[in-house]
Image (cartoon, rainbow, N blue to C red):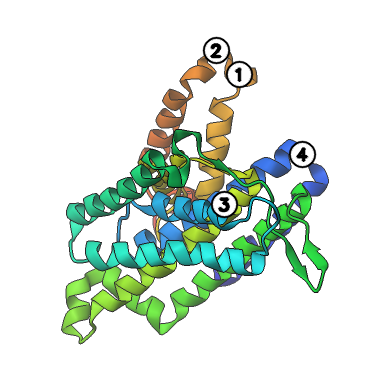
Amino acid sequence: MMVGKRMFVVGAVLALAAFPLLSGTFGVDLVTKIMIFAILALSLELLVGMTGLVCFGQSALFGLAGYAAVRLSPESDSASMWWLLPASVGVSGLYALFMGALSLRTRGVYFIMVTLAFAQMAYYVVHDTPLGGGTDGIYLYFKPTLAIGGWTIVDLDKPLPFYYLVLAFLVAVFAKLALLARSRFGRALAGIHANEQRMRAAGFSTYPYKLAAFALSGCIAGVAGFLFAVKDGFVNPELLSWHLSGSVLIMIILGGLGHLRGAVLGAFAFTLLQELFQSEAVFGSFAKHWHLGLGATIIACVALLPQGLIGVPAQVRRRLFGEGAK
């Protein structure tokens, strides 16, 4: 079973690596955006699927890194990605640390509402102050450079090199979280998810573990936010809206909670479904009401696939070979 999972991951990476050879500019741009959202979904999977913390503030961590990338970039020249990326991720990580330090003192629905409140605070700061350019947002006039000694490693102005850079980040984040899940820290998070009271009774102080997971999740969301700002060369307050947090939560539920592969699969499924229902070539004038079609499809998926898309093979095997089929 483990070999099958690894083969699936390797096959998916190879398919993504080969995709630009078979696709045009639009396809490369779309899949680049989806991979960035997949990184964001993985950051939330760390909280929800691995730790059991349903967070509604992920969009703030994503958007703040994007705004930091634009604000820290000079308007007359390109910044070096070697310092701009860590600085942008640091902004998200620090805000996650601050948000987690306070919100983790609450539980259940109160925790959800506190994280939502933190996200809305960040949203209104960039929406209502000159810092974020208001509703118009702000532009990244020069994309950062990734070079060593004057030699450019990746030209971020070109879609294809940037595509492979995003793919490299996605693979790195996925691998990091997969290793973390098998570590002592990851097993502690799994124990907290299963039964936090029992973990405390066993002598674990769960608060530091949850805070560390929250901060790490913020840093990963910051990576996604940085890449999104560089991709579009533009950020606006919608990146911090609660709608995005809800969308990312739907992604990991649609893909299958508790599985890193599910988070990536859910990001692809959700974004492609959104593109499909927004297509006037397919749905004509109904495309203006794409929320209805997308919502109905997600409801059907949740009702028919309780384990998410990642559980489809097991569900098919059970139907074909019986209830106990593995």
Q: Is 300 positioned to the left or the right of 211 in the image?
A: right
Q: Give the mark nearer the N terminus: 4 vs 2.
A: 4
The kind of secondary structure element at disc 2 is helix
* Residue 308: x %, y % from top left: 43, 49
Amino acid type, mark 3: Val
Residue 318 visible in this rendered orientation of the protein: no
Quarter occupied by residue 99: bottom left
Please say if 40 is above or below 184. Answer: above
Amino acid type, mark 2: Ser
Mark 2 is surrounded, within 10 Å at the Cα level, by few (under 14), some (14 to 19) or many (20 or more) other residues, namely few
* Residue 14: x %, y % from top left: 73, 59
* Residue 49: x %, y % from top left: 38, 61
- Residue at 56% across, 56% down: 69
Q: Which residue is mark 4?
A: 25
Mark 4 is surrounded, within 10 Å at the Cα level, by few (under 14), some (14 to 19) or many (20 or more) other residues, namely few
Q: Which residue is mark 3?
A: 70
Amino acid type, mark 1: Glu
Please say if 145 is above or below 276. Answer: below
2 vs 3, front mark: 3
The N terminus: image quadrant: bottom right
Amino acid type, mark 4: Thr
Question: Mark 2 and mark 1 in contact (Cβ < 8 Å)?
Answer: yes
Q: Give the mark nearer the N terminus: 3 vs 1.
A: 3
Tell me the CA gap for discs 3 and 1.
34 Å
Q: Give the mark nearer the N terminus: 1 vs 2.
A: 1
Given residues 269 and 163, the one toward you in this image is 163
Q: Which residue is mark 2?
A: 285
- Residue at 39% across, 80% down: 185
